[in-house]
Amino acid sequence: YKTMEPAENRPILQGGPTSGTFVDDPDVSRKYLEGVIQLGCRSSAIYSFLISLYVKMDDEEPLIKFLSTHVQAAATAADASRTAGLAFGDVAITGPLDMSYALRAILRSGRHFRSAIKLYMGFGMRQQAVE
C-alpha cells in the first residue's frame, strides 16, 4: 500500500489526457483538496490550486469560508516573523496560503469582492479594502 503525495495527483486533478471520471467533475477535485488540507497538508501548491478552483465558482461562500479560516493564520504568522526579525527584505515566513496569489487571482476574476476585502484586511491594507 503506497500513499501518494498530493503533488503526484496533480495530473489526475487537472484532467490530463489519461484522466478518468474522477477529474471530469471539478467539485470532486475541490473536495479532494479540501480533504488533503484537513489532513494536514502544508503545500503552498495545493492551497493555490484550491484557490484557483474556488475563484472559478459562481458561489463565493466556499472561498470566503476558506479564507476566513486561513487568512488570519497567515497574517499572524507573517506579523510574528517580522516582529522576531525573521523576515528577509519584504519576504516573511508565512503559512502555506500564498495570500498575494489569492488576491491576484480574485482581482483577475473581477468578482468575489468580499474575498478580496478579506485578503486586503489580512495584509493590513484597510484603505484598499474600502476602495
Image (cartoon, grey):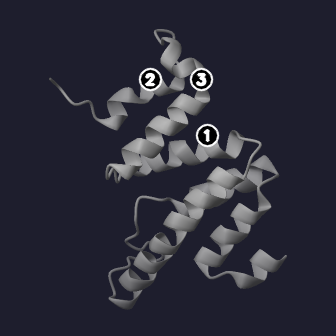
Q: Amino acid at mark 3?
A: Asp
Q: Nearer the viewer, mark 2 or mark 1?
A: 1
Label 1: element kind: helix
Q: Residue at x 38, y 84 (%)?
A: 80
From the viewer's side, name the closer residue of 43 and 20: 20
- Marks 2 and 1, how far apart in space? 15 Å
Q: Residue at x 41, y 43 (%)?
A: 35
Callout 1: 10 Å neighbours few (<14), some, many (20+)? some
- Residue beneath label 2, please? 11
Residue 31 is situated, as x and y percent measured from the top left of the image, at: 50, 38
Say which residue label 3 marks. Answer: 25
| Residue 16 appears in view | no
Q: Position of residue 105 (x, y in %)?
A: 67, 51
Label 2 CA crowd tier, 10 Å (few <14, some 14–19, many 20+): few
Question: Identity of the amino acid at label 2?
Answer: Pro
> 67 or 10, which is in the foreground?
67
Query: Residue 21 appears at what percent x and percent y?
Result: 52, 13
Instruction: Name which of mark 2 and mark 1 comes first in the sequence.
Output: 2
Contact between labelled residues 1 and 2, with CB atoms less than 8 Å apart: no
Q: Where, by quadrant of the figure, is residue 36 drawn?
A: top left
Q: Secondary structure at mark 3?
A: loop
Q: Residues within 10 Å of mark 3 (few under 14, many from 20)?
A: few
The image quadrant of residue 117 is: bottom right
Q: Position of residue 121 (x, y in %)?
A: 65, 77
Query: Measured along the vertical axis of the image, is residue 35 above or below residue 86?
Result: above
- Spatial separation of the CA atoms under disc 3 and disc 2: 14 Å
Tag 2, which secondary structure?
helix
Residue bearing the label numbered 1: 53
Q: Residue at x 39, y 90 (%)?
A: 83
